[in-house]
């Protein structure tokens, strides 16, 4: 009788070794190896596996020019924000991995999408965490249509695929991949090998049947998706659902998308009746803006192809510490430290004895260099205690010498500002020269940070 073999698998990257190691040689993480038992493989099975391997016929190579061109048809999900991030809708046979913190609303969003899609397609919602009765209670709370939506409380991959073979669903949703168990692996549910084997079986089914699959993934305390890193490479799209549970807004971003852009942003609002798409996030983010207060500047950020206006706030206060505080939310902290140094060196603003706090209202995360000028003006407004015009919108990138550099997609940003009633625009001079034809707005171009401070002070 064959003996069971024991090996160790890294919980972070899936690296396997016959003995325990303190540090993983593949990913460099410490204390991540878990002991797992391999079931013995019988000799007939090994022989059959070897025969099948050698009898497999590989597809013939062909010229790229001979490959037929096909346009992937997309199926709208009924949620415009989700469609925006996906690139227009669901692609047949695509596998989408949705990750997010516990309680952020992943299951709620998918159940709403499943109920909407079930009106025109066969949809199977599989849960390994909740019973069918719990799913029904949630659907009743959200007032969702239930007549055409099929649910299954199961965590065996083989059983799920057997049900799918008979039902032939157009869309399959699995919540979550970490709870699935495959008979091909003897490891515990949620382990690296189980997640890998379960995902591989589901992806094979999706590609062969043309079923679109949603997989819900848990995240670790560091914010990355739990399980092997190869899981993100196996799927077609990786979506991240972000948001503070203390706030109503949720943000959907694509970390990977084989069928669209990864720069698009979906904005949702969490309400008592579920998660709803925010079609005009600029108005929502500015609706509670503090007017008549120093330190507040409106900035237009580009999230993919969408311009979004947000309220960028700063507070400069006398510090009573040896090292003044620099607290930043929504903007790169190292970038803010650089801008404060430029303000002190080039604009003569004394910030060495000031605590500086910078925040983007609404929970947005900005990585747009065009926010530099808005950050500097917000800090200067709070430091010198002067108010900026409520109809002013500021955009521009700042260099180390204090120069204001041109920004990308300036025309789309300006059009969004004018649409929302902002008639005073402060831009880099090079962009301002190209936008002289904009009606209903007074555009001021500046070359340096000093000029921008002189114009707004």
Image: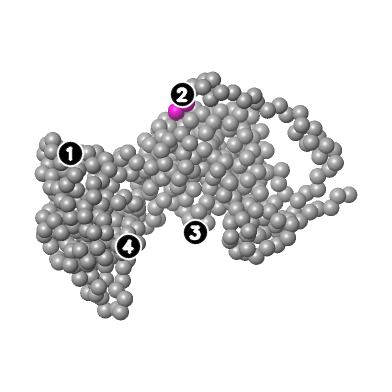
Q: Quadrant of residue 412?
A: top left
The crowding category of the residue bearing disc 3, from other C-alpha atoms within 10 Å (few below 14, some 14 to 19, many at least 20), is few
In the rendered image, residue 94, in percent from the top left (x then y), is placed at: 52, 33
Q: Earlier in the sequence, mark 3 or mark 4?
A: 3
Kindly identify which residue carries mark 1: 434
Seen at 57% across and 49% down, the residue is 229
- Nearer the observer, 133 or 109: 109
Distance from label 1 to label 2 (Cα)?
37 Å
Q: Earlier in the sequence, mark 1 or mark 4?
A: 4
In the rendered image, residue 225, in percent from the top left (x then y), is placed at: 52, 51
Distance from label 1 to label 4 (Cα)?
33 Å
Kindly identify which residue carries mark 2: 71
Kindly identify which residue carries mark 3: 222
Q: Secondary structure at mark 3?
A: loop
Residue 328 - label: 4
Note whether residue 354 is visible: yes
Q: Earlier in the sequence, mark 2 or mark 4?
A: 2
């Amino acid at each position: 009788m064959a003996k069971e073999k024991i090996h160790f698998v890294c919980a972070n990257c899936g690296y396997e070794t016959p003995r325990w190691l303190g540090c993983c040689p593949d990913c460099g993480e410490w204390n991540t190896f878990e002991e797992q038992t391999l079931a013995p493989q019988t000799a007939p099975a090994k022989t059959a596996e070897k025969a099948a391997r050698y009898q497999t016929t590989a597809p013939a190579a062909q010229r790229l020019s001979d490959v037929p061109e096909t346009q992937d048809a997309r199926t709208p999900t009924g949620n415009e924000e989700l469609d925006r991030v996906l690139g227009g809708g669901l692609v047949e046979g695509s596998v989408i991995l949705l990750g997010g913190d516990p309680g952020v609303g992943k299951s709620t969003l998918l159940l709403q999408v499943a109920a909407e899609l079930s009106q025109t397609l066969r949809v199977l919602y599989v849960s390994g965490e909740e019973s069918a009765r719990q799913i029904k209670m949630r659907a009743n709370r959200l007032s969702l249509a239930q007549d055409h939506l099929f649910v299954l409380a199961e965590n065996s991959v083989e059983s799920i695929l057997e049900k799918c073979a008979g039902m032939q669903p157009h869309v399959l949703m699995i919540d979550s991949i970490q709870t699935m168990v495959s008979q091909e692996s003897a490891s515990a549910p949620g382990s690296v090998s189980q997640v890998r084997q379960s995902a591989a079986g589901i992806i094979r089914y999706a590609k062969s049947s043309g079923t679109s699959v949603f997989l819900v993934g848990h995240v670790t305390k560091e914010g990355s998706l739990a399980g092997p890193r190869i899981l993100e490479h196996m799927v077609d799209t990786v979506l991240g659902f972000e948001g503070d549970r203390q706030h109503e807004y949720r943000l959907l971003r694509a970390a990977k998308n084989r069928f669209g852009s990864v720069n698009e942003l979906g904005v949702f609002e969490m309400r008592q009746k579920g998660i709803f798409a925010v079609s005009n996030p600029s108005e929502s983010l500015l609706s509670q803006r503090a007017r008549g207060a120093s330190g507040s500047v409106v900035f237009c950020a580009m999230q993919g192809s969408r311009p979004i206006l947000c309220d960028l706030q700063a507070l400069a206060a006398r510090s009573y510490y040896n090292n003044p505080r620099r607290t930043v939310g929504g903007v790169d902290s190292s970038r803010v430290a650089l801008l404060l140094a430029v303000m002190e060196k080039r604009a003569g603003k004394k910030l060495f004895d000031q605590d500086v706090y910078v925040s983007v209202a609404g929970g947005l995360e900005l990585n747009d260099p065009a926010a530099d000028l808005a950050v500097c003006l917000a800090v200067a407004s709070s430091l010198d205690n002067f108010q900026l015009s409520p109809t002013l919108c500021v955009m521009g990138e700042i260099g180390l010498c204090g120069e204001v550099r041109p920004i990308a997609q300036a025309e789309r940003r300006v059009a969004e500002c004018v649409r929302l009633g902002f008639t005073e625009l402060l831009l880099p001079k090079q962009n301002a020269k190209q936008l002289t034809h904009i009606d209903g707005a007074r555009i001021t171009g500046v070359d340096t940070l000093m000029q921008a401070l002189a114009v707004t002070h």
